[in-house]
Amino acid sequence: MTLYVDGFVLPVPKKNRAQYTRMARLMGKVWREHGALEYRECIADDVPKGKLTSFPRALKLKSTEVVWFSYVVCRSHRDHERVFAKVMKDPRLAKYMNPKGLPFDGKRAIFGSFKAVVDL
């Protein structure tokens, strides 16, 4: 089995931590209900601003924001496509489908999907 992972790096305003966490709990519930194996939300703890590259530099992080790293694991690319389609249509997430409904600047979010190569 080749796992498939969606990864997200987000600039979340510190003042929106509670709002973002509520959204993330709902997102996780929905992803898991539709078949995701794992859903994780992680807040930066030791993420220095690098001289050339880093999460803060990539996000153009403001002093009032904090980096969040999130990921979702599915059984395969095919399963991911099935789960993702259901998540995007779930009415509980409708307000987050509009960028104005997000507790962070979605234009500066970094995201992508990855096929697991090493799985220990």
Image (cartoon, helix red, strand yellow):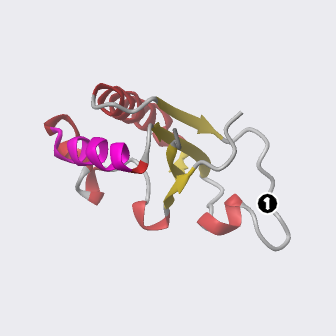
Return the residue nearer the eye: 38 or 119: 119
Kindly report the secondary structure that dominates the magenta region of the rendered protein: helix
Asked whether, in this view, residue 115 is left or right of residue 85, the answer is right
Residue at horizontal 35 percent and vertical 35 percent from the top = 27
- Give the quarter of the image for residue 44: top right
Q: Is residue 75 left or right of residue 82?
A: right
Looking at the image, residue 81 sits to the left or right of residue 118; the answer is left
Whether residue 10 is visible here, answered yes or no, is no
What's the residue at 21%, 42% (across, down)?
A: 86
- Tell me which residue sits at (79%, 60%) in the image: 49
x and y percent of residue 93 in the render?
Answer: 23, 40
Residue at the spot of label 1? 49
Query: Is 53 positioned to the left or the right of 30 in the image?
Result: right
Instruction: Look at the image and tell me whether residue 47 can be seen.
Output: yes
Q: Which residues are magenta?
A: 78-90
Which quarter of the image is occupied by the C terminus?
top right
User: Can you give x and y, in whole percent of width and height, for residue 63 in the image?
Assistant: 66, 56
Q: Residue at x 24, y 52 (%)?
A: 97
Q: Is residue 48 above or below residue 29?
A: below
Question: Quadrant of the rendered structure where residue 34 is?
Answer: top left
Depicted 24 relative to depicted 58: above or below: above
